[in-house]
Structure formats: C-alpha cells, structure tokens
C-alpha cells in the first residue's frame, strides 16, 4: 500500500507529476529505485499515461492484476476517464468495502467519486488517509468546488504545519489563494510563475495556473502570453482552452471558435456543462414569463 507522501528517492518523479510534467514521469528511469517503491513509481507512471490520453492502454496493461488494490484503483480511474463511469464506480465501491485503508484506493477512488458528483463519499474516503499530501490536495480541491473556501484554507493550514516545504502544499495553497483574492493573487502568481518559466519545471498545468493568476490581477496581455505558451505545449489541453475562452470574453473577442474547440476536445468540461445548465434554467424561466405575457 504505497503512501504517496514525500519519500526522498521518489521526490523527483512525484514533483514532476504534481507539476503536470507527465512525459517526464512516463520516461522516468525507475530501475534504481528500491523494491518497496516500485509499485508507487509504477502507479505514478500509469496515472501520467492516463493524464496524457492513454487511459485505454492503461486499462489493457493492468488487466488481470486487479487483485492488487492499487492497480484496481488505477483501472477504475482509467475507466472513468475513458467514459465508462458505471464500471469505474463498481470497482471503487468494491475497493471501498475491502481496501478502504489503502492510500491509492483512497486517492483514486475519491477522484472517481468526486467526478461523479459524490463529494461527501469522496471526503469520507479521504478522511481515512494518514499523512498523504495528495489526499490533502484533493480534499482542498473538493472544498473549493463546494465553495467552502474556509474548509479548504483550514486544510492547507493544517498541512503546512507538518509539510512546510512541500511543493504540493504550495500548489494547494495557491489554489486557495486564487479563491481568497486580494494579495493572495500575487502570491499564487509567484508560485505558478516560478514553475512555469523554469525550463526544468515548465508544463501546461503551471502555465495555465500562471495565466489564471494573471487574469485575476487584470494583466490580460500577460495571461494571453502564458496561455499561448500552454497551447503550444499541448493544443488539446482543455484547461488552457477553457481559460482562453475566459480571456477572450474579458478582452471582448469572439469565442465561437474556442468554444467549438473545447466541445470537440472535452465535451463534458465543467465550464461547458455549467453554461448548458444555466442556459436551460434561463430557457425555463423565459418560458414561464412568455406564458404570462400570452395569458394577458
């Protein structure tokens, strides 16, 4: 049961994963790692492949290894990403019953549950973690999605006391800072900008983070430059496309091409679903109003 917390010989591969440098994780030479860390490093590489669009390949690779709870959890995540949510939930439900103390089951199982809108079940599973910084980061993300910035901040502050120098805690604190606002925008910018602009750590994820901070600071030209860099690295990155739409709206530019691109790359992206939901609510309200007008 690998614990995805700071382990010295795993530090480089873990940090590369946290920064979104997935190709570096996939190519990482794990031959010199100690046997007890072999499974943890393999899981990171499998997750990096899932994040790189290779979910189906990962499902095929771990087929027949589901007796290992960690690999069963990886398969569930890959199934969810590939669009088979029912199969993923079935696996997660089983793992929650038989391996709830497994760190990978907690993390990836909660990821699947949250993706299916089961936030409280995800938090219940994550509450079992023992010093797992990725679990902390996921709890922070869930609280932010629940608009409970107070709980997200509390989680980060608690983690800061026992993992003060952790890159992942810095990133999670920056997520919260972007929600808190004020001087926290600039602090978050420094974290993302440092990662994004250093050749050894630059990745699409950090560039998007920098761009979001720039947007909050009102620096539209700088945000545009960061997003262009992100799109050059990964033209299919949904977060880069979604934030480019936000930038275009703020800049008064046409968004139709970007919206079409996002629909083709990530039709279930939260921003698209949110617009669809609000559009349906508006249409429903308009129908009621029109009915009153006709009745008069």
Image: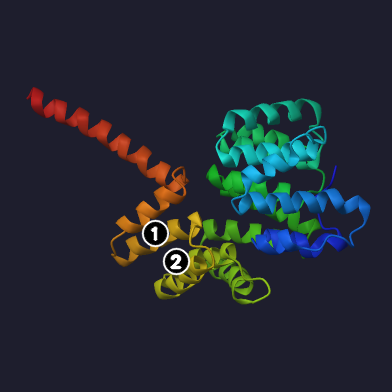
- Distance in Å between CA atoms under marks 2 and 1: 9 Å
Which mark is on residue 246? Answer: 1
As drawn, the residue found furthest toward the right would be 35
- Please give the residue where the numbered disc 2 appears in the rendered image: 215
Q: 16 or 170, which is in the foreground?
A: 16
The residue carrying pointer 1 sits among few (fewer than 14), some (14 to 19) or many (20 or more) residues within 10 Å by Cα, namely some
Q: Is residue 95 above or below residue 190?
A: above
Q: How many numbered discs sit on the rendered protein?
A: 2
- Residue drawn 60% across the image and 44% down it: 142
The residue carrying pointer 2 sits among few (fewer than 14), some (14 to 19) or many (20 or more) residues within 10 Å by Cα, namely many
- Residue drawn 44% across the image and 56% down it: 242
x, y percent for residue 106? 74, 39
x, y percent for residue 117? 55, 34
- Quadrant into which the C terminus falls: top left
Which mark is on residue 207? Answer: none
- Is 48 displayed left or right of 236 in the figure? right
């Amino acid at each position: 049961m690998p614990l995805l917390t700071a382990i010295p010989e795993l530090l480089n591969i873990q940090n590369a994963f946290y920064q979104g440098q997935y190709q570096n994780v996939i190519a990482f030479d794990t031959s010199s790692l100690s046997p007890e860390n072999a499974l943890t490093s393999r899981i990171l590489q499998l997750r990096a492949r899932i994040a790189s669009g290779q979910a189906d390949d990962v499902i095929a690779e771990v087929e027949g290894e589901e007796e290992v709870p960690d690999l069963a959890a990886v398969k569930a995540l890959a199934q969810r990403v590939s669009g088979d949510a029912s199969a993923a939930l079935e696996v997660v439900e089983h793992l929650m019953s038989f391996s709830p103390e497994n760190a990978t089951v907690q993390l990836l199982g909660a990821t699947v549950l949250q993706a299916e809108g089961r936030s409280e079940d995800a938090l219940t599973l994550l509450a079992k973690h023992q010093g797992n910084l990725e679990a902390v980061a996921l709890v922070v993300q869930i609280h932010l999605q629940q608009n409970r910035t107070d709980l997200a901040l509390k989680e980060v502050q608690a983690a800061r006391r026992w993992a003060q120098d952790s890159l992942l805690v810095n990133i999670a604190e920056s997520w919260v800072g972007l929600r808190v606002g004020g001087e926290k925008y600039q602090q978050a910018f420094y974290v993302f900008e440092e990662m994004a602009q250093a050749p050894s750590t630059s990745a699409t994820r950090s560039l998007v983070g920098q761009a979001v901070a720039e947007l909050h600071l009102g620096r539209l030209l700088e945000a545009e430059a960061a997003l262009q860099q992100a799109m050059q690295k990964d033209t299919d990155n949904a977060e880069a496309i979604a934030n480019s739409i936000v930038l275009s709206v703020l800049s008064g530019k046409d968004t139709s091409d970007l919206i079409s691109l996002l629909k083709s790359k990530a039709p279930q992206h939260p921003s698209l679903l949110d617009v669809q939901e609000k559009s349906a609510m508006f249409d429903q309200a308009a129908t009621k109003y029109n009915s009153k007008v006709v009745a008069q």
